[in-house]
Amino acid sequence: MIAVLQDIRSIHNVGSIFRTAEGAGFEKMYLCGITPSPVDELGHPRRPFAKVSLGAERFLLWEKVKHTEKLLRALKNQGYRIFAVEQHKNAKLYSSFRLSKAARKKTVLVVGHERQGVSRAILKLADEILEIPMRGKKESLNIAVAFGIAAYHLTQ
């Protein structure tokens, strides 16, 4: 599986997602837009990132990409199926999906900005929008937690 992070602001959230993705067996991460990478502009490791990721970035391929929409179109053209995690009127319960081992090889999991979520343009490109039900008073989960729930479910 591949993970696409669209405009995630927090370096701590990104580090946590790296650690989770590596643990769940993802093969690659695309860091899009403003999403911070494990290294700064000079190629030096970012300490806050490494503190949270515990070095997962050394075992997981990653690439910094400017435009999420262009990337996802290219992945779709290569036969990938796009799953976005977002609260949306067309969303389906995340637990309603089961992927075969073969299907996982051509699956992309997209999460977006901590406040604004996955953009409308990306949701239009998604083959499926996955929602995690909220049963308490809060309306949403931390993005790294939401990624973890969806990632581990889809890789079972």
Image: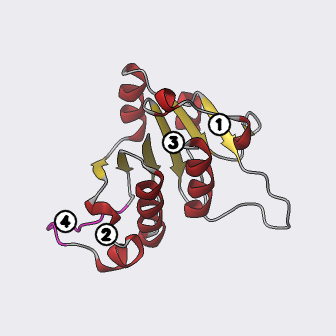
Cβ atoms under marks 4 and 2 closer than 8 Å: no
Percent position (x, y) of residue 113? Answer: 53, 56
Give the mark, 4 or 2, whose residue is nearer the N terminus. 4
Whole-Å distance between the Cαs marked 1 and 2? 30 Å
Local SS, label 1 = strand
- Range of magenta residues: 36-44
Residue located 50% across and 32% down the image = 101
Amino acid at pointer 3:
Leu
Residue located 77% across and 37% down the image = 89
Amino acid at pointer 1:
Ile
Mark 3 — residue?
Answer: 109
Say above or below: 27 vs 11. Answer: above
Local SS, label 3 = strand
Tally of numbered tags: 4
Mark 4 — residue?
Answer: 41
Mark 2 — residue?
Answer: 55
Whole-Å distance between the Cαs marked 3 and 1? 10 Å
Say above or below: 43 vs 130. Answer: below
The numbered dot on residue 92 is none
- Residue 97 vs residue 10: left or right? right
Callout 1 crowding tier (Cα within 10 Å): few <14, some 14–19, many ≥20: many
Local SS, label 2 = loop
- Residue 34 vs residue 130: left or right? left
Amino acid at pointer 2:
Gly
Say above or below: 142 vs 31. Answer: below
Residue located 44% across and 26% down the image = 80
Give the mark, 4 or 1, whose residue is nearer the N terminus. 4
Q: Is residue 124 magenta?
A: no
**Which of the 4 image quadrants contains residue 57?**
bottom left
